[in-house]
Amino acid sequence: MTTLFINARLIDPEQTQDVLGGLLVQDGKIAEIGPDIKAPGDAEIVDCAGMCLAPGIVDIGVKVCEPGERHKESYRSAGHAAAAGGVTTIVTRPDTLPAVDTPETLEFATRRANEAAPVNVVPMAALTKERAGREMTEIGFLMDAGAVAFTDCDHVVTDTKVFSRALTYARSLGALVIAHPQDPGLSKGAAVTSGKFASLRGLPAVSPIAERMGLDRDMALVEVTGARYHADQITTARALPALERAKRNGLDVTAGTSIHHLTLNELDIADYRTFFKVKPPLRSEDDRLALIEAVRSGLIDVISSMHTPQDEESKRLPFEEAASGAVALETLLPAALRLFHAGQLTLQELFRAMALNPANRLGLAAGRLSIGAPADLICFDPVAPIVVDRAKLLSKSKNTPFDGQRLQGKVKATYVAGEAVYQS
């Protein structure tokens, strides 16, 4: 199938360009890019009418609740939600029931994803068995089965010797380890970030220093082992100097942050609204602004949704007892465009963090507008107004903090390998 996109505002994070032009897709790949492309006789013409055409989002850290909790999210519902949100590749977490810690479980998940999801699904596997932090998984066999990275998600490996051995073994295989930098002792039982606001609300809190301590430990071990390391979420200004120092010293380290920590702050939980309870907890406004600057400078490499579905029963509880997490596949792009409309990040900088950098870190060919790259594309109107209605979300779970909020940015169409998987 041949498709020619014309009158498009091409957002190219690799070349840092934002230009008007056209893009030709042949056999599922980008064949030509330029201002004046002649259409082959059999080409389908898609007029973008001046809207943005960008590489599809590559979202690291999506939780799909198969197996075990399919009522919260399935590969089918997550795949359709991703397509509606402009996410063409979801990188799934292993924190399911049971955990994805064996080749057999991984192959089941991959088979279900290929059957049900209209977008690309790339799996991660657990770093330790049952995510218990005691014994590392069969990293080599899991890589052969298709795992692109290894993580215990928010279960921090507290035994430093176990974590060091896992990093050493991962280094010998060239595997990427994704960790959750947090001191588990300090953060245990915490629901919010410490400070005057937390005290006034009477909620158990954790100091931002817990993240700094967790990252310092991990950086020391990465320095010793030489492993490839990615921090799933950096959310505080206090952790940024340690990250900058590690990169300056040449360690193979990257870091991400979530869209919620870039666009919300601790005051949003004012009325004990549990849809705003995420992990790590929302931080101060100073932290939020520091994170935006870190994304702009490239210190933080990746923006992700950290899509975590929770059912009504686990969210409709007192704040301290409620489950953490929020769905974000469909709101990731319009929430990120808040930063564009505020003049804090350009579209190229946003798509560098949401598409190009995550693809590069995982060794994927997606995330760019270049000849020969997969035609995983999104066409979107960056100024179209929307009002988020959680009842209309395609995710099975509806726990979004953006319910009822007015945002700008609407996905008009999503293409995977040149084929439309969503059209508004």
Image (cartoon, grey):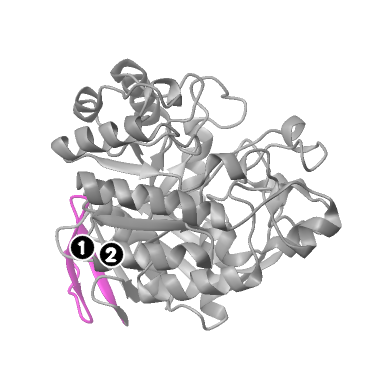
27 magenta-colored: yes
Query: What residue sits 33% from the left and 74% below the top?
Result: 10
Three-letter code, disc 2: Lys
Q: Which residue is mark 2?
A: 247
- SS at mark 1 in the image: loop
Magenta-colored segment: predominant secondary structure: strand
Name which quarter of the figure residue 143 lies in. top left
Q: Position of residue 55 (x, y in %)?
A: 33, 62
Relative vertical location of residue 368 with respect to residue 230 in this rendering, above or below = below
Relative vertical location of residue 52 with respect to residue 251 in this rendering, above or below = below
- Of the numbered discs in the image, which one, if any, rests on residue 408? none
Q: Magenta span covers which residues?
A: 20-40
Name which quarter of the figure residue 403 lies in. bottom right
Q: Are marks 2 and 1 in contact (CB under 8 Å)?
A: yes
**Residue 210 vs residue 39: left or right?**
right
Q: Position of residue 158 (x, y in %)?
A: 45, 34
**Residue 326 vs residue 114: left or right?**
right
Relative vertical location of residue 11 with respect to residue 170 in this rendering, above or below = below
| Label 2 environment density (alpha carbons within 10 Å; few <14, some 14–19, many ≥20) | some
Q: Which residue is mark 1?
A: 250
Q: Position of residue 128 (x, y in %)?
A: 37, 26
Three-letter code, disc 1: Gly
Q: Position of residue 196 (x, y in %)?
A: 78, 64
Query: What residue sits 23% from the left and 76% below the top?
Result: 15
- SS at mark 2 in the image: helix
In this view, the residue farthest toward the top is 104
Asked whether residue 119 is in view, the answer is no
